[in-house]
Amino acid sequence: MQTFQVLIIGSGFGGQCAAVNLLKAGIDDFLLLERRDFFGGTWCQNTYPGAAVDVPSPLYSLSFAPYRWTQMFAGQAELHRYTQHVVEQFGLRDKVQLNANVEHIEWDDDAKRWAVHTASKGTFYAQFLINATGPLSQPVIPHFDGIERFQGKTFHTNNWDHAYDYRHKRVAIVGSGASAAQVIPVIAPDVEHLHVFQRTAHWVLPRADRVFGPFQRWLLGLKPAYKLLRWMIYWQFETRVIAFKYSRPAIHLVQQQALRLLKRQVPDPELRRKLTPDFTIGCKRVLVSSTYYPTLSRPNVTLHSREQGIKSIDETGILTQDGQHIDLDLIVWSTGYDATDGVISYPVTGRQGTQLKDVWAQYPRAYLGTSLPEFPNLFIVTGPNTGIGHTSALFIIESQMNYILDCIRTLKKQGLRSIEVRPEAERTYTEMIHREMERTVWKSGGCHSWYQSKSGHVIAMFPGFSFSYHRLTRALKPADHILS
């Protein structure tokens, strides 16, 4: 029988952070389950041209694993190397089971443990279960009439086909969000023609990137210097919440900066009109790029706005809403992920047969974005309302670990077997989250974004300062939980 004290589903930064924290707590009876045939998560999976982080690398890293970054905003290849650095530094390679795609999980109340059923590796059992599959792991491809008829090449940015040579080809990018804004400037110079299908315009701010010289990289190898730089960046970015939530004048100033960039980089008034958003900056994810706008002005790039969007697809290309037929060799879907309603992609059965899909039928919710009534010993890393729009997601992940490890330690200390949050505690927390959300630009900024679930509730974001979330997760509140 494959039995462990803790199972971790996912081997990206969330899974790695959980694993290292368990080791530091003296718990080594755990296993990471990874559905792919490689270790590492998002930054090993997303290898599309131009893939890079949009948070400064010294902050977008685990606090216990500093690194000598080569540039301020690391590219995918360096992030991949950093992932492997963490794996090797903490000896995690022997703690992972690859090709273990989880099909469903269920709680056994008599045995006080979770059964995790996989497609090809059998069933695993554990007292504690940490879901670290991440919010950006389920790619979405919208349906269009005739999509299955297209005879050219298609793939999602999440699964870029590097065997396909896009040079001198007629290419369409469907989507204009963060990944599209990174792909487009890289491939545009090499294709015959690039058609960009934009559903809504996004706000863009310049990317203040820089390459670190030898001396700066040497400094990054010194823990005091690394820590100082992290905190300087952290507090600079933390002030953005003032604009997103508390100060309309502040967010107006940021929006004016974005408008100046648009005017400076896009001289054509018609193209500039198509690229001007009709919602408040911050309502959707802000793109960080100094090359996106100039690329859209290239003679071999055509931007199609909503009124010129996709009507249907046939064997040779795309028919647009305004009657054009565009012949294509390649369609790239840069259409995002199911990051709200699809936080956990597999069926979950809790106590007394409670189904997670039923609990979340209205909208996903969780105490501290991490735990749920009726689901003992289950912890969700980057669960509902743990996203952060202004700083590093890894800060939130590390904060969650404080709460998760405190739950596990408390049970061990008291000789108990299970812990679950009380329904009234989860309800009070969730009501607070959505009450505070009303004051944010994500709720009141006049857009519909992937931050929102089908219900209209903003599910992806935490409505406040990241240090506020850190304070909430700093220690277990026994009165909010049932221990048995």
Image (cartoon, rainbow, N blue to C red):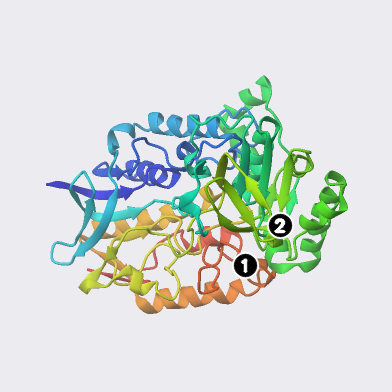
Residue plotted at (41% across, 74% down): 426
Task: Give the percent coordinates (x, y) of residue 141.
Answer: 49, 54
Location of the C terminus (image quadrant): bottom left
Alpha carbon distance from label 2 to label 1: 17 Å
Is residue 148 or residue 222 the one in the foreground? 148
Residue 26 visible within the image:
no
Work out whether 216 lies above or below 356: above
Residue type indicated by callout 2 = Ser
Residue at mark 2: 305
Mark 1: few/some/many CA within 10 Å (<14, 14-19, 20+): some
How many discs mark residues in the rendered view? 2
Secondary structure under tag 1 reads: loop
Q: Residue at x 11, y 47 (%)?
A: 1
Left of 421 or right of it: where is 222? right
Q: Amino acid at mark 1?
A: His
In the figure, residue 383 lies in which quadrant? Answer: bottom left
Q: Secondary structure at mark 2?
A: loop
Provide the residue designation for mark 1.
448
Measuring from the top left, give residue 256's x and y in whole percent.
83, 57
